[in-house]
Image (cartoon, grey):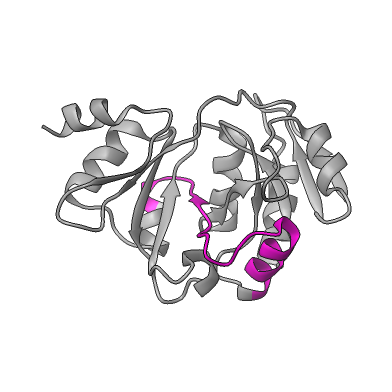
Amino acid sequence: MRRVFVDPAAPQRDAIEEAAKWIASGYLVAIPTDTLYGLAVDPFRAEAVERLFMVKGRSSDQPIPLIAADAAQIAATLAPLTGIAAKMAERCWPGPLTLVIRAPRTIAAAVTAGTGTVGVRVPNHDVARAIARTCGRPVTATSANISGQPATGDPNLVEETLGDRVDMLVDTGPTVGGAPSTIVDVTGAAPRLVRAGAIAWEDIQRWLS
């Protein structure tokens, strides 16, 4: 595994471009986010997504979350955010809110686990957003661990547990950790809480009232 050290306060452009190139070429790259380290592949490459499932030992009935550079990238590659979804995105992004939206037909089917929907957010982490921006599309961000094992914000643990399975590790040091993102389904007439997380559902409901 290639390990590249990146200054989170001033990310080196060549490191970001290298990570994006590896992802675009179908490789598996461990990247930092505003919570934990995640595993990034191109969600539009079925073979890369299949390898991601194998590396994690993840069940095929579990969808894979995505991160994006911004709402504009989501609109261009997945689906436009309108109405309540747009309001929630404007209020909470960048940050720990994942919105479940309709998935485009071009995305690898395994990403949606047969649901026809996909969860995506804009993380509050400059390096993660820069990688997605340079890729030109959202990337996967499922936790960098073997399924059933604890997720981690420690790049050393990522290397210890996945070093022989991951092609590249973008190391910005330990991440802040904390609660996972709140997941809200916005595909229906009203938003629906899927998973409680860092942003309280009560707060979201109050903002939307």
Foreground residue among 26 and 163: 163
At horizontal 83% and vertical 33% (from top left) the residue drawn is 156
- The image position of residue 33, as x and y in percent, is 59, 36
x and y, in percent, of residue 53 in the image: 66, 63
Q: Is residue 76 magenta?
A: no
Percent x, y for residue 6?
75, 33
Residue 160 in percent (x, y) is at 87, 40
Instruction: State left or right for residue 193 relative to residue 3.
Output: left
Q: Please, is residue 23 above or below residue 47 in the view?
A: above
User: Is 125 displayed left or right of 70 in the figure?
Assistant: right
Q: Quadrant of the C terminus?
A: top left
Q: Is residue 199 above or below residue 100?
A: above
The stretch in magenta equals 47-72
Q: Is residue 47 above or below residue 172?
A: below
**Residue 53 colored in magenta in the image:** yes
* Residue at 57%, 33% in the rendered image: 126
Task: Say left or right for 93 vs 141.
Answer: left
